[in-house]
């Protein structure tokens, strides 16, 4: 009884592989541009206020008691307004600790998000000029 089940599972897998070969996958873009800066948004959940930060690479700004530093911003050259990847460092002055350091992705802010009880910070887009 086990052999027909295994055989059936193998045939289903083979059929799925054949169907997957028929699908044309778009080529990944190799044209990545580096922005001169980025636009970020900060949210204070307690006060219910937001503020937009326009930072050049290497600059920093405050969101409450956090210091947000932009290290780099990259975007696909074919669609600069469509996506942004920003390397951000966030320092909490009250805890005297770096609480975030890494890439944030504009289209998926929850993928690599700041974990803070009061503040949220996310990327909107790169500045290309």
Image: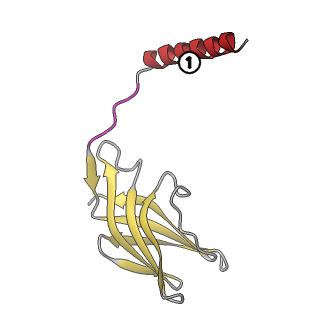
Q: Main secondary structure of the magenta part?
A: loop
Q: At which x and y percent is residue 5?
A: 68, 14
Q: Residue at x 53, y 87 (%)?
A: 95
Is 94 drawn above or below residue 10 in the view shown? below
Q: Quadrant of the C terminus?
A: bottom left
Q: Residue at x 38, y 29 (%)?
A: 26
Res 90 → quadrant: bottom left
Q: Magenta stretch containing residue 29, yes or no?
A: yes
Q: Quadrant of the N terminus?
A: top right
40 left or right of 119 in image: left
Magenta residues (range): 25-30
Residue at the disc numbered 1: 13
Is 109 drawn above or below residue 51 in the view shown? above
Disc 1 is placed on an element classified as helix
Is 49 drawn above or below residue 20 in the view shown? below
Q: At which x and y percent is residue 109?
A: 52, 57
Q: At which x and y percent is residue 66?
A: 49, 82
Q: At which x and y percent is residue 27?
A: 34, 31
- The foreground one among 46 and 81 is 46
Q: How many marks?
A: 1
Q: Magenta stretch containing residue 13, yes or no?
A: no
49 left or right of 25 in image: right
Q: Residue at x 48, y 88 (%)?
A: 96
- The foreground one among 110 and 62 is 110
Q: Residue at x 41, y 80 (%)?
A: 61
Residue at the right extreme, as displayed: 1
Within 10 Å of the Cα at label 1, are there few (<14), some (14-19), or many (20+) other Cα atoms?
A: few
């Amino acid at each position: 009884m086990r052999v027909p089940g295994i055989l059936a599972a193998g045939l289903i897998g083979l059929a799925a592989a054949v169907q997957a070969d028929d699908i044309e996958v778009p080529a990944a873009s190799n044209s990545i541009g580096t922005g001169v800066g980025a636009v970020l948004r900060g949210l204070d959940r307690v006060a219910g206020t937001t503020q937009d930060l326009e930072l050049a690479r290497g600059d920093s700004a405050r969101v409450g008691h956090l210091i947000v530093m932009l290290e780099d911003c990259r975007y696909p050259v074919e669609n600069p307004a469509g996506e942004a990847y920003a390397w951000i460092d966030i320092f909490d002055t009250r805890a005297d600790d770096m609480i975030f350091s890494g890439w944030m992705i504009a289209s998926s802010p929850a993928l690599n998000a700041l974990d803070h009880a009061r503040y949220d910070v996310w990327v909107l887009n790169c500045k290309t000029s």
